[in-house]
Image (cartoon, rainbow, N blue to C red):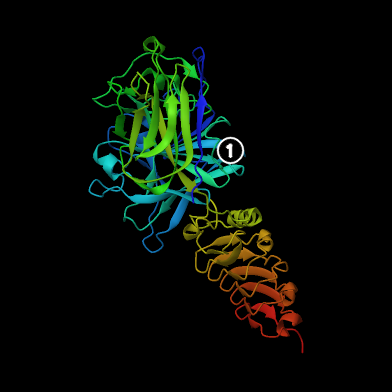
Amino acid sequence: MSVLRLTVFLLLSVSSLSQLSPPSAILIDCGASSSAVIGGRQWQSDENFVTSGTPKKITDQVVDEILLTVRSFPLNLINTRRKFCYVVNVSRGWKYMIRTTYYYGGVNGKDTPPPVFDQIIDGSFWSVVNTTADYADGLASYYEGVFLAQGKSISVCIGSNSYTSSDPFISGLELVRLDGTLYNSTDFSVSGLSLVARHAFGYSGPIIRFPDDEFDRFWEPYSLNSTVPNNRKLEVSGFWNLPPSRIFNTDLRAIQVQPLEFPWPPMPLAKAVYYIALYFAHDSDSLGDGSRVFDVSINGITYYRELSVTPAGAVIFASKWPLEGLTTLTLSPRSGSNLPPLINGGEMFQLISLGGRTLVRDVTALNAIKSSFENAPVDWNGDPCMPKNYSWSGVTCSEGPRIRVVALNLTNMGLSGSLAPEVSKLTALSSIWLGNNSLSGTIPDFSSLKYLESVHLEDNRFSGNIPAFFGGVPHLRELFLQNNNLTGQVPNNLLQKPGLNLRTSGNPFLTQPPR
């Protein structure tokens, strides 16, 4: 059963905010070859954040310079579930607003419809990206979420899938560090927030953003013909969510003292649990001796009773509210209230359950192995195991709360370079299959891998002696070393190990021990 938390906060009227500095943010112009100042803010090229994909230019005319380029990622029709990750260094323990922007621009061919694909944060599925409707209207699409930095970096990944047969892409990526008070009713160790709607009610102009919103959140216009905007400048602030004071310049209100009912958000919702915050402030010029008290309900279920709106302002929020389909927001005057109900702003997020994370020691070891390869698989970025249907190519992981790497199978992957000694830190491994590549160097120490059953290093360029430690690996039953450049003698303890299938042919300088 969902736990519902509903709270009201009052605001204090304060003087207008001083000139704001740009938020602490990392702005990445995907596919761009160099950094540039766009809209008065510094955007970086994405070359230092991603190791795969192809930069491409858009030939369409666009109103925003960051839409001129994209990074496109190859869709593999055989292995459709691969992720391609931007890895961004962040401040551990801080919340970040993450915004991804997509403008297709026909990069896969003007006659090819936009791709549909997944986006992933660290080891957790975030959402499906479908830009088809927006692109048909000549618009870019953006997705926004709030997530906690649980480590020193955050990975934002494009997940290719089998929804369509067109290469996925991304135009822009922003990570904005948030004030600690924002959205603090959510336990970000287990959940993230994915934006569904954020509206300035009664407003019909362009999107409100920085510098009005100090964190550059987007407040979209939402107006109805049956309501009257107040167009007064109320100086309210102090919300722990820090909405921009400009959203209180307009409102939706009933013309008379009667219920105000309207659809919000303006699209059907998936069956899920949602965070909802609604913002209210009364214009003092028309208050007089009147009162503005009303109940707030969503789909006929009371959300808050007897809300009294004053010039100081108020916000009411629910941290976990189950919803599905089209929703209706209703403001119903209470008996004795002689002023019509009104509302200034609203935010709605879907709660995203966070998946597990691969054990940090295993992640560190795999990244060292990746560095020792000269041409590691293109999808070796982000969390190696999660989401579990997007694990790295050749990596098999355990289930349960403690996620470990239990097998490596990179057979016939065209790998070159060496095998890093950090493979010994993958202590849950039961098999290592690296056959039919071009790996060279000596075989590292596997003696710490007590669960190891099968080692396939055949058809490579490994050199040096066959290590004797293999004889002490308790469960080892297969050791394939044929067709390498190994030298010296085959250790006696391997020849005498019960149940071991040992293959060493094709090493011309390898000798058997004397009988």
Q: Quadrant of the C terminus?
A: bottom right
**Residue found at x 65% / y 59%:** 420
Is residue 37 rendered to the left or right of residue 364?
A: left
Which residue occupies 61% across, 42% down? 152
Residue that extends furthest to the front in the rendered view of this protein: 335
Q: Quadrant of residue 244?
A: top left
Placement of 249 over or under 329, stated as above or below:
above
Residue 220 appearing in the image? no
The residue at 37%/49% (across/down) is 168
Residue drawn at the location 35% of the way across and 29% of the way down = 332
Residue topped by disc 1 = 90
Q: Position of residue 449 (x, y in %)?
A: 69, 68
Residue 317 visible? The answer is yes
User: Within the image, what quadrant is residue 298 found in?
Assistant: top left
How many C-alpha atoms fall within 10 Å of the one at disc 1: few (<14), some, or many (≥20)? many
* Amino acid identity at mark 1: Val
Residue 300 drawn at (x, y percent): 35, 39
Q: Nearer the viewer, residue 242 or 418?
A: 242
Residue closer to the observer: 221 or 65: 221
Which one is nearer the viewer's eye here, 54 or 99? Answer: 99
Q: For numbered disc 1, what is the local secondary structure?
A: loop
Where is residue 391? Give x, y as percent. 51, 59
Left or right for 388, reference 223 = right
